[in-house]
Each structure stands twice: as C-alpha cells, then as structure tokens.
Amino acid sequence: MCGIVGYVGRPGTTGAAGEDGAAVVLEGLRRLEYRGYDSAGIAVVTGAGVDVRKRAGKLANLVELLDADPLPAAATAIGHTRWATHGGPTDANAHPHVDGTGRVAVIHNGIVENFAVLRAELVEAGVEFTSETDTEVVAHLLGAEQERTGDLTEAMRAVCARLEGAFTLLAVHADTPGVIVGARRNSPLVVGLGEGANYLGSDVAAFIAHTREALELGQDQVVTITPERVDVVGFDGTPAQGRRFHVDWDASAAEKGGFPSFMAKEIHDQPQAIADTLLGRTDTTGRLQLDEMKISEAELRSVDKIVVVACGTAAYAGQVAKYAIEHWCRIPVEVELAHEFRYRDPVVSERTLVVAISQSGETMDTIMAVRHAREQGAKVLAICNTNGSTIPRESDAALYTHAGPEIAVASTKAFLAQITACYLLGLYLAQLRGNKFADEVAEVLEQLHEVPGQVRQVLDGLEQVREIARSMADTRSVLFLGRHVGYPVAMEGALKLKELAYIHAEGFAAGELKHGPIALVEPGQPVFVVVPSPRGRDSLHAKVVSNIQEVRARGARTLVIAEQGDTDVEPYADVVIRVPRTSTLLSPLLAVVPLQVFACELATAKGLDVDQPRNLAKSVTVE
Ligand code: F6R
C-alpha cells in the first residue's frame, strides 16, 4: 500500500506555508515510508509547468537524486512512496506518472481493476505508455479530460466514473498551479487544514508536523484544495462536507499511523488486507481468475498432490489451506515446515504442486524448499506479500497477497491475507477441475467478501479481551485448544503469545489433550478454546464442547471463542469471546483476531516492545 502526500501553500512566500513544496512533501513521505518503500517520487507545479523527480528503492534514493538535481521552488507539490502492485519497483514504474504532454502528474494508491481494458483502448488511440503501472492509465485519461473540460476537478470526476477497483488519486496540472485535486474510493485520503496552506495525505502522519486539524472524506468523493479553500463533491457532482477532527497525538506516534505500535496498526489493517487480497479476482461473468497463475490449466488439472511449504505463521496458514483445499478439491494436501521438507527426501513428482507461502518472500528455509521441489520436477506456486522477492521469482507461478508492508516482526495481517489467498487458490482449483459449479464458488466468494466487515466487528468488540490480557500480565503459561481449522488457529494464538509476551504457550489439537497434555492442567491454568460453529458438523462442535468440560473439570480457567448465538458453551466457559457467524472453513479469519489482540495487549502490559520482540527478525534469511 502506498503513501500519498499533497501540499499547497502561498506562492511568492517562503517558509512553512510558502514555496518550500518539495521539502514539505518529503517530510510527509518520511512519515509514510512504512506504507511502502519500493520507490518514491515528487512532482511540483510552477508557472513554468510540472517537474517530476522519482527513484526506485527507499526514500533515501530520492533524497540523493534531489540533492544532485533539486526541484524548483514551488508552492504546490505531491509525493508518493510506493508498495508495488502493477509492475516491479523500477524508476519507470515509480509515481508520479505524467501524460504524453507532461502537463498533468498523478499519484495513486490502490488497484485500478479495469486498467487492462482502459490501457488497450488508449493504446488503440495511439497513446504511448512509459510504465507497466495501472496508474499511468489515469494520467493519460486525466490529461485528455482536462483538455476537454478545462477544469481539473471535473476532469477527475469524469475519470473516476470510468475506474473500477479501490483507489486514492492526487493530481496536479500545469494549467492550475495552486490546486491539487484528490479522489478516493475504498482507499484512505484525509485533508490537513493549515494556516495559508492545505494538505492531503494517506493518513494524518503525512502532515502532522504542520497541522493537527484534519478533515475526513467520505467514499467516492473528489476534493479540491488551494491554500485557502477545501471543496468536496461526490463522484456524481453533489456538493459534500468532510468531517472535521482534531488529531490528539503527536508527530512521533504518527509514524505508526497513530497506533501505539506497528503491530496494533497492522491488526487494525486486517479488514483492508483481506479486501485487497480479494480485489480484482473475478472476471465480468463472476468467474474466478488468478491472473498471476502461469502454470497451464492442463498441468493444474493433472495435479495429484499438493505440498505446502512454509515456516511459522505462514505454515499455520498452510494448515488452514489443507482443510479447505482437500474439502473443495478432493486433492490430498500435505503441510510441511520448509526446513524439514528437503531433509526427509519427500516424494514429489511433476504431478505435485508445491505451494510456498511467505510474507517476505525471502525466508531462506522456504527458498531452499522451493529449489528442492523444482529440482524434483514439481511445479511451485508462491503465495507471497512482497512483489519482486526471491520466492515468487524462483517459482513457476505467484499469487500475491495485498496486505501492504508488514513492519511489526510478528505476523498478523499477512497471516489473514495468506489464508485468504489459499482460499482463492482452493476455489480456483475446484472450479478448474470441475469439483465445484460456478455458483458454488460464487457463494463461497460472497461469504469471503463479507469477512472484512466481520473482522472489523470483532476488532470493535475486543475491550473485554484487552482487559483480560492486562489482568494476566503475570501469567506464566497459557494453553490453546482447537479442532479442525481451529487447530492451526490455536497454534497461531500460542505462537503470538510466545514471541510477543515471552510466556510459555502451547497450541494443541483438542482431541490430543487426553493423550498427555492434559497433565499440564492445574487449578487456574488459563486455556483458550477455539469452538467451531454449531451450525457446521454437529459432532465437531459437540466434541469441542466436551473438551472444554474436561479441562474445566480439572480447574482450568476457560476462555472460549465461540460464534454469536452458540449458547452450548456458556455453562462451561469462564469467559466467552464472541465472533460473527461464518462457515467453519472461513472461521479462522475471525477466530484468530482476539488471540492476536490478547498477545499484543498482554505484551504491552508487560512493558515489552511488541514490534521488535527479542531474538527475532522480520525476514529470516539464514537456514
Ligand atoms: C511469526 C512470524 C514468523 C513468520 C515466519 C515466515 O509471527 O512472523 O513465524 O511467519 O518467519 O516468514 P515469511 O512469511 O516471511 O516467510
């Protein structure tokens, strides 16, 4: 996910509200770099036209370029820090993008889903493209509309009417120095209200150094800012008002988007991570399409076994995938820790599909498993959150999650995005191999599209979990139980607690308890239990309810995660944490959220650094 900054000050003056546009925007980009750092760029508008500087890589590369080749003094500037989606992290793909005349410059966050159709249309009309991005389409369309209407706001409205997907756009034009036009649909954009200057940003971090007064925009709105005015209209031209608010935290906190830690922010971002991962996966007839899939349909039809290789949290996503893919596709799925895979001489052939799951795409254990699988003749599909990283590059196909950059060492939003991508893969294979009719696939997809809203609901109702976590700061051991897809959720809950709060925690398959681990249960032992839906397989639910009774009978304190309306658990639960109703297979996306929040809150209560836990690193590049 990209970071966006816009600034208009007073021309002919210097200082904070004057012609220091490039410096003001650069300061904003520094605070937004956590959103993406594949490239960065700035455009300024002067009486002489639009000037652009942009560079692949971190912001430091752009700073170097600006030192060598400074931008002119300008009171209007826009800036962008990129997390690549369409097109690799190159100078050419860096934003801002201009049209053929170089008089309009555009920056963009999000995905224009119908960009291929629009691009083909423009190419047909003789437009030449200089990048692989979806954004450049907008620059060309906007240039033409500005020519036609002579009004940048009108031009933006006309272009937005043609775009599908989620986007935030900012545009400047040589004809209108002193004006920035922004637009938003399902992607963030806020206005900063200054003295003789106004600002735009992906979040308030972009302008927090200059003003703490802000205006929240609604969906499908176009905003036009000048040094003195902020005008908002709907995409349909109806005048609108933003909601004004005061930012009550300081500039240093803003680097985390106002959250106390990157982890808290990333937990909060999860609905968007799921929604973005689902975005643009169906064609006009509603049929599922995975356009990053470069393995032939014939090869996929002949697959007789899937092996998931991954580490840590990503491996738990793989375990959820096993239940879904086996159920939907009737293909056997093995899940193997990547570092164990190649040492056991695994049986793989050209009919094996190896699915490598990795947030970073740089985990050495997983890279080595991918190489081993390919040497054995297997096809490898990478599920990865990092465009251009090693694992997708060395695989036969890649399915990208769109969780945005994950900065906290402990994985949260990437996990939910990985599970979502696994569901997409399972449904795609089921459709391709004829295990499911199109309407059955569509039904699951519909449920999946409801999940972001349901995760938001879970997040909004977690004060009870936070209180419990704070009260358990001295706890020395916590157990987590689950069956079926609840089992990997239990293990992920335990992992989060271990790595963040340094508390001994174990996740067990609930049925395994009586085979030994139940000896650990003593009076007061906290035990989380992930309960499947009572509307699913009857026996599964009943068995987990029995497991709660077993540990309760031995004095455990039971903390039960159960679906809304499941009253069967109430007699045996010390605490019931409710999650919305969804199908059992999709339920991990909801059930894991309280466990993430529990670990994050408990670690915070212990005064620990939740973003950088001891002994860990974000990307594990050694075997
Ligand atoms: C746990 C965590 C790790 C990673 C694992 C794989 O919170 O973040 O267990 O999931 O190191 O990393 P990636 O997904 O980058 O391959």
Image (cartoon, rainbow, N blue to C red):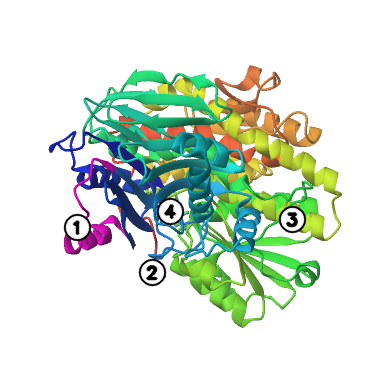
Q: Residues within 10 Å of mark 4 (few under 14, many from 20)?
A: many
Q: Is residue 576 left or right of residue 24?
A: right
Q: Earlier in the sequence, mark 2 or mark 4?
A: 4
Question: In the image, residue 192 lies at what x, y percent?
Answer: 31, 29
Residue, x 44% and y 61% (percent of image)? 93
- Residue 389 sits above or below residue 375 on the image: above
- Name the residue tied to disc 4: 83
> Marks 1 and 4: CB-CB under 8 Å?
no
Mark 3 secondary-structure assignment: helix
List x then y, in percent, for residue 618: 37, 55
Q: CA distance from mark 1 to mark 4?
A: 24 Å
Q: Nearer the viewer, residue 86 or 70?
A: 70
Residue 411 visible = no
Which label lies toward us, 3 or 1? Answer: 1
**Contact, mark 2 vs mark 4 (Cβ under 8 Å):** no
Which residue, given by chain and number where applicable, does mark 1 sit on? 70
